[in-house]
Amino acid sequence: MRKIKKETFVSEKIELLNSAINGVGMFAKTKVYQEEIVWIKGGYILKTSEIFTSGVINSYLLISDDIAIGAYTEKDEEKIKAYCNHSCNPNSRVQGNIVFVASKDIEVDKEILVDYAFIDNENYRFKCNCKASNCRKIITGFDWQLKKLQQMYKKEYFSSYIQSKINLGISVDFKCQLDKQIKDLREKVFVNELNFDIQDEFQGNEEKFIHCCLYKNDELIAYARVDVEEEYARIGRILVKKEERGNGYGKQIIFWAETEALKNNKSNIIVHSIESALSFYENQGYITLGEKFVEESRNHYLLNKHLELND
């Protein structure tokens, strides 16, 4: 699969300069006009398991779940990496999978910026330094799922690979209060399936939580709520619709609940888990602390996880 290799093409209008966002960036030497090609990703066509990356700057670009354009050795990486930094207010977009064009006119000395939501689908989080008024504060490798971004950007902003993901109907959103879909799904799972008392399930203080909602074609399929009012964050009421279990949606909703905790400066996470769910949380990196205890008439265990965030 490593038969074809092209070096990354960068427009002659672009130069590398120091960037306040991430050390080095691509800047316009002369004016770049809307729809003009800025750079084209080069590299080998590789299986994701074959990619080399130093971790200093990712030199690969996913074009499917299993295939990427990237480096096979450290020597390759230097020749094909492009210093296009993230911004929550980008001035470039993707055309197809590997061509990056200006989404607006870019004036001289302005940095070329792209929203990583257009191209990435992998497990990472880092602090954003873009300083834009609409900065998301924390960027993740799954930001394409954010409903507000899907609604804000036109289809042609996303790579073909990411747009194919969006076309499947998956999106995530966050609410400050319960709505009918949340109430109905929580009652179905916790009251009808797990036999929790309905009075315990809805205690009237729901406005203090961040309600994390994962949708499939606008239907709620996974949910978690986050309490960030203490010195730690507590994630609770994690659920996946019965018909959608086994598809990785539980892992996804935990990821988003953790991200919301980090956005509220909480890196220490606790969960109260019933015994049958212990292995699920342990697989997500949670550690069981102490003995079981009774909560809401059920045996529970306390679990903890400390989150690390890259700069």
Image (cartoon, rainbow, N blue to C red):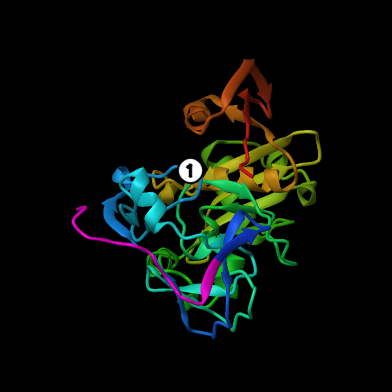
Asked if residue 34 shows in the view, the reply is yes
Magenta residues? 1-15
Report if residue 35 lies within the magenta region: no
Image height check: is 117 above or below 208?
below
Q: Is residue 233 left or right of residue 187?
A: right
Image height check: is 105 above or below 227?
below
Q: Residue 143 lies in what quarter of the image? A: bottom right
Image coordinates of residue 226 in percent, x first then y, are: 69, 44
Q: Which residue is mark 1?
A: 55
Compare residues 150 and 180 and report the one nearer the observer.
Answer: 150
Q: Amino acid at mark 1?
A: Gly
Q: Mainly helix, strand or loop, the magenta region?
A: loop
Image coordinates of residue 237 in percent, x first then y, are: 62, 41
Q: Secondary structure at mark 1?
A: loop
Farthest top residue in view: 291
Image coordinates of residue 239 in percent, x first then y, are: 54, 44
Report if residue 11 lies within the magenta region: yes
Q: Quadrant of the C terminus?
A: top right
